[in-house]
Image (cartoon, rainbow, N blue to C red):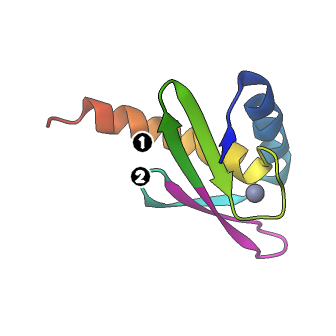
């Protein structure tokens, strides 16, 4: 798991905007990201540790990659919806 910072996620989102991969929600905090050109699919997981936001992708990258950048948008929307949903 890699900690998400405003700097590294900004970079990853920038790359995702260029790559425009296809993001599918598997479940809350678990996403599948497919490169439309190569068809390669990776799984991105998000978690929280105290105030730290963490993410993990099963691609080769050891940084906050663009797969994480691509799925965080969906993740934020979903997290807000879950928070708003009645218990
Ligand atoms: Zn990745």
Q: Quadrant of residue 23?
A: bottom right
Judge the density around disc 2: few (<14), some (14-19), many (≥20) Cα neighbours within 10 Å.
few
Q: Is residue 50 above or below residue 74?
A: above
Residues 59 and 82: in front is: 59
Provide the residue designation for mark 1: 78
Q: Which mark is residue 28?
A: 2
Q: Nearer the viewer, mark 2 or mark 1?
A: 2
Q: Which mark is residue 34?
A: none
Q: Is residue 80 left or right of residue 64?
A: left
Residue at x-position 49% and y-position 37%: 48
Residue 74 is one of the magenta-drawn residues: no
Q: Is mark 1 within 8 Å of ligand 1?
A: no
Q: How would you classify the magenta stretch by its main secondary structure?
A: strand
Please state the extent of the stretch shown in magenta in the rendering. 30-44
Ligand 1 found in image quarter: bottom right
Name the residue at the front extreme.
50
Q: Is residue 63 above or below residue 22?
A: above
Residue 33 is one of the magenta-drawn residues: yes
| Percent position of residue 54, x then y | 60, 40
Residue at x-position 65% and y-position 48%: 1
Name the residue at the left extreme.
87
Residue at x-position 65% and y-position 52%: 56
| Percent position of residue 52, x then y | 56, 28
Q: Is residue 76 above or below residue 20?
A: above
Secondary-structure class at tag 1:
helix
| Percent position of residue 33, x then y | 66, 62
């Amino acid at each position: 798991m890699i900690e998400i910072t405003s700097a590294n996620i900004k970079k990853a989102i920038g790359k995702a905007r260029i790559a425009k991969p296809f993001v599918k929600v598997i479940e809350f905090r678990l996403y599948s990201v497919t490169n439309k050109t190569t068809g390669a699919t990776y799984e991105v997981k998000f978690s929280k540790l105290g105030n730290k936001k963490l993410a993990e992708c099963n691609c080769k990258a050891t940084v906050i990659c663009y797969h994480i950048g691509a799925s965080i948008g969906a993740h934020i929307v979903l997290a807000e919806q879950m928070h708003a949903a009645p218990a």
